Amino acid sequence: QVQLVESGGGLVQAGGSLRLSCAASGLTFTDYTMGWFRLAPGKEREWTATITRGSIRKDYADSVRGRFTISRDNTKNTVYLQMNNLNPEDTAVYYCAAMFHASARYDYWGQGTQVTVSS
């Protein structure tokens, strides 16, 4: 049974930082590209960042580029999202997702972790 479990969310003031973690189990982690998405109230789900299996490539949405950093530790089956200089527009539930390398869509999703940025 595949599980993706996010942690690290919380309440932070504008300008602050948080680091999200997503621990994966039940899959061969190195077979999967990992991504972070977010869902804010009243908005559609937004792709945030992606990291390939060997961390060779990292991509970011324009809204977070330069402030967020995605990374992974394949020895711990964990992907991270370091979020700096947060602003209230970053308030959302953040989800991690796993995409098998030969797939065209994300196959597994976590349950999400809430990030709230106060002004």
Image: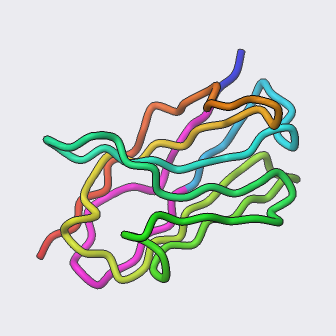
Which secondary structure dominates the residues rendered in magenta?
strand
- Residue 68, position in %: x, y? 49, 73
Q: Quadrant of residue 50?
A: bottom right
* Residue 62 placement, left or right of 35: left
* Highlighted magenta segment, given as a residue range: 4-20
The residue lying at 71 percent from left, 15 percent from top is 1
- Residue 92, position in %: x, y? 28, 51
The residue lying at 83 percent from left, 66 percent from top is 56
* Residue 9 placement, left or right of 73: left
- Asked if the magenta segment contains residue 52, the reply would be no
- Residue 5, position in %: x, y? 57, 37
- Asked if the magenta segment contains residue 6, the reply would be yes
Q: Quadrant of residue 41?
A: top left
- Above-or-below relation of 22 to 58: above
| Nearer-the-camera pick, 85 or 42 | 42
| Nearer-the-camera pick, 115 or 42 | 42
The residue lying at 77 percent from left, 32 percent from top is 100
The residue lying at 34 percent from left, 41 percent from top is 45
* Residue 53 placement, left or right of 43: right
- Above-or-below relation of 87 to 104: below
Quadrant assignment for the C terminus: bottom left
